[in-house]
Amino acid sequence: VRLDLVVIGAGRMGRAVLVAASRDPGIAVHAVVRRRPEAERLPDGIPCLGDVDAALARAAAGVVVDVAPGTGASDRIARVARAGWALVEGATGLDSGAEAALTEASRRVAVVVAPNLSPGAALQRRLLRVLAEAREPGWEAGILDRHHAGKRDAPSGTARLLAEILAPWGEVPVVSLRQGGVVGEHTVHAAGTEEEIVLTHRVFSRSVFAAGALRAARFAAAAAPGRYVMEDVLRSEGGGAPAPA
Ligand SMILES: NC(=O)c1ccc[n+]([C@@H]2O[C@H](COP(=O)([O-])OP(=O)(O)OC[C@H]3O[C@@H](n4cnc5c(N)ncnc54)[C@H](OP(=O)(O)O)[C@@H]3O)[C@@H](O)[C@H]2O)c1
């Protein structure tokens, strides 16, 4: 089945999604939306627009992959849902307005909310759920989130998810380092006085996020309206971790 896509964002992530999509003959990218549509041309001559509605008008329906910065996301989320397109929300740093827009959108269309699109990060969460349930007396946890210097939000969306899983341990400190070209790394330290467990997930290339975005898009294209997470996507393919409680 052909997958019809519109990509919002033409930066580091948007370009990685376009490269992955160009390698899949079953995917048609109808348009890319960015802030400055007049900026340099994209590969394959894909139309580059500054307006979400105009981009969605280029095909009857399909899936939007949103990998623009989280600020201001509520407006584009509402436009996507109004047009009846499914959504993979890959932006992080979403404000409460965007969260409300996602809830509203999921009443009309399938919405996959994935601040981390990599399957390995879903596995890290699964491992962490085991740890979160089995706290040893006196143990404390902390999270280290490392990303490249261009990342705007801190803590990362992934670090927030990890901290949520550790909620039974109380408020968990998160330290964010923004330096150099680090694509993405999250480490959970859980330490007692005499021993510790360290759980690290490290991404070598953005192509892993891009591949995850396309898997999430295929899932969203076929899913009933509702709000989903990466675990739902992986489970639908017969693998991955069980959905979080
Ligand atoms: N879910 C995941 O697994 C995952 C992984 C990595 C990153 N991310 C997230 O993806 C987002 C983008 O990251 P990035 O590194 O690609 O950023 P980036 O390189 O700075 O690119 C951002 C892109 O978004 C466009 N943009 C900015 N504001 C926009 C708006 N209001 N409407 C439409 N497009 C807009 C920019 O347009 P111009 O080019 O015209 O300026 C640019 O092309 C961030 O939220 C980041 O945290 C998610």
Image: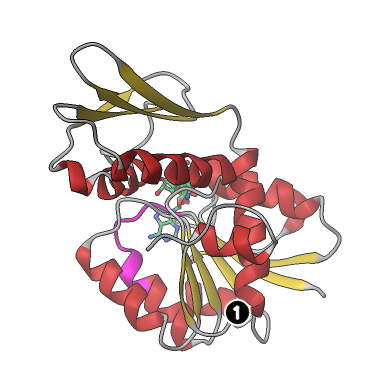
Would you call the spot at circle 1 few (<14 residues within 10 Å), some (14-19), or many (20 or more)?
some
Q: Total marks drawn?
A: 1
State which quarter of the image contains the N terminus: bottom right
Q: Where is residue 186 in the image (x, y as percent from the top left)?
A: 39, 31
On the picture, is 175 further left or further right than 206? left
Q: Where is residue 31 in the image (x, y as percent from the top left)?
A: 64, 66
Query: Any magenta on residue 69?
Result: yes
Question: What residue is shown at x 51% (from left), y 86% (from top)?
Answer: 83
Q: Where is residue 96 in the image (x, y as percent from the top left)?
A: 21, 65
State which quarter of the image contains the C terminus: bottom left
Question: What residue is shown at x 68% (from left), y 81% (from top)?
Answer: 59
On the picture, is 190 further left or further right than 82? left
Depth check, front residue: 149 or 236: 236
Q: Where is residue 69 in the image (x, y as percent from the top left)?
A: 38, 52
Is residue 155 in view?
yes
Secondary structure character of the magenta stretch overall: loop
Question: What residue is shown at x 54% (from left), y 54% (from top)?
Answer: 38
Depth check, front residue: 156 or 119: 119
Question: What residue is shown at x 18% (from left), y 41% (from top)?
Answer: 169
* Residue where numbered disc 1 is placed: 223
Q: What element carries label 1?
A: loop
Q: Where 119 sits versus 202, above or below? A: below
Farthest-out residue, right: 25
**Over which residues does the magenta segment extend?**
68-75
Way the structure is coloured: secondary structure
Q: Where 20 sits versus 173, above or below? A: below
Q: Where 161 sits versus 28, above or below? A: above
Specify the quadrant of the image occupied by residue 135. top left
Q: Where 108 sits versus 44, above or below? A: below
On the picture, is 95 further left or further right than 33? left
Q: Looking at numbered disc 1 in the image, what kind of residue is underneath it?
A: Ala
